Image: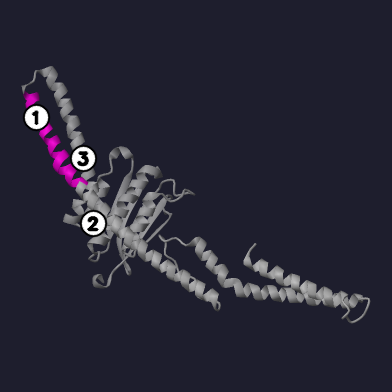
Amino acid sequence: MSLFWRIFLLNAVVLLIASALVLLGPITISTPVLLTEALIMSGGLAAMLVANAALLRVGLAPLQRLTRAMITTDLLRPAQRPAVTGDGEIADLIRTFNAMLDRLETERAASSARALSAQEAERRRIAQELHDEVGQTLTAVLLELKRVADQAPPPVREELLHVQESTRGSLDEIRRIARRLRPGVLEELGLTSALKSLAREIPSSAGLSIRTRVEGELPPLGEEAELVLYRVAQEGITNTLRHADASRMELVLRREPFGVELLIRDDGRGLGNAPEGAGIRGMRERALLIGAQLSLGRSPMGGTEVRLRVPLREGER
């Protein structure tokens, strides 16, 4: 039973007892109680209960708003804090809750920044090892296969050439994985070229046609913001390939008055009622690192739309 109903029923019991004492006790207007007197007392009791309920509802409304805020709060989706209303302990409780949310969001942002920084460092290390160790080893294997194939008899040469092509395909795949782990094109050629490179990496066997365009002259962005935009686009493309069953996709990067906006749209099956997975939550965490807003909805193409709005900092305006 809620606090409202407990207090209300308690007051109702007290009022009922008081009314019963007035009606049935020695102190009364007349004995026996007349019908008109009973109606008047009943009407007065009903009026007192209604007034009591209204007063309690007004007094406890701040607690109800605080309860709704507690239920709907998501640290990955910062929202407006509950207004500090009420008096005394209720106002102190709301202020304490708001301070707790501020502290939790700050701590989560700091821990997420450390985790994502460590993740990027580990990706760079793995990409470097793939390129330097595995890549060079496979390159040496290719050269050796070519040398042996040139000296082998024709039947064996055909088999060696087949092995050589398989090894070359594995080497290309390792290089593609290394590029996804460590986007060197982002560091060397910038965000626009990196996004176009992402689109070109989609295999033709996936059956997905992707269109990339940049609208307007982009402002200078920090390294962290560019990396967040790149990773969100990368995750959006991956989700579309895995889950959307789409045939067309758009990747749009454009300048807006507030900063930069990234749009990822497809004509797939849409979000439906499926819960958000680790990929989407990862995108939200990255967006929070740079104060960006990430929203998901229905695309004009019929599928899913991912919208990332990155505000410009003071030095970037």
- Tell me, yes or no, whether the two marked residues, 2 and 3, touch with CB atoms within 8 Å: no
* Rendering coords of residue 149 (x, y %): 9, 24
Q: What amino acid is at disc 1?
A: Glu
- Describe residue 2's horizontal placement relative to residue 141 as left or right: right
Instruction: Using a 10 Å C-alpha cutoff, classify the residue at mark 3 as few (fewer than 14 neighbours), some (14 to 19) or many (20 or more).
Output: some
Q: CA distance from mark 2 to mark 1?
A: 39 Å
> Which residue is at the front of the view, 240 or 137?
137
Decide whether residue 270 is among the magenta residues: no
Q: Which residue is mark 2?
A: 192
Residue 138 at x, y percent in the picture:
14, 35
Q: Secondary structure at mark 2?
A: helix
Q: Which residue is pictured at 35% across the width and 53% down the height?
A: 282
Whichever of callouts 2 and 1 sits on the residue coming sooner in the sequence is 1
**Which residues make up the magenta segment?**
126-150
Q: Is residue 140 visible?
A: yes
- Camera-nearest label, 2 or 1: 1
Residue ID at (89%, 79%): 26
Q: Are marks 2 and 1 in contact (CB under 8 Å)?
A: no
- Residue 296: image location, x then y, percent: 41, 56
Would you say 154 lies left or right of 18 here?
A: left
Figure quadrant of residue 187: bottom left
Which quarter shows the N terminus?
A: bottom right
* Mark drawn on residue 144: 1
Label 1 environment density (alpha carbons within 10 Å; few <14, some 14–19, many ≥20) = few
Going from the N terminus, do you reach mark 2 or mark 3 first? 3
Chain-order first, disc 1 or disc 3? 1
User: Label 3: which residue?
Assistant: 174
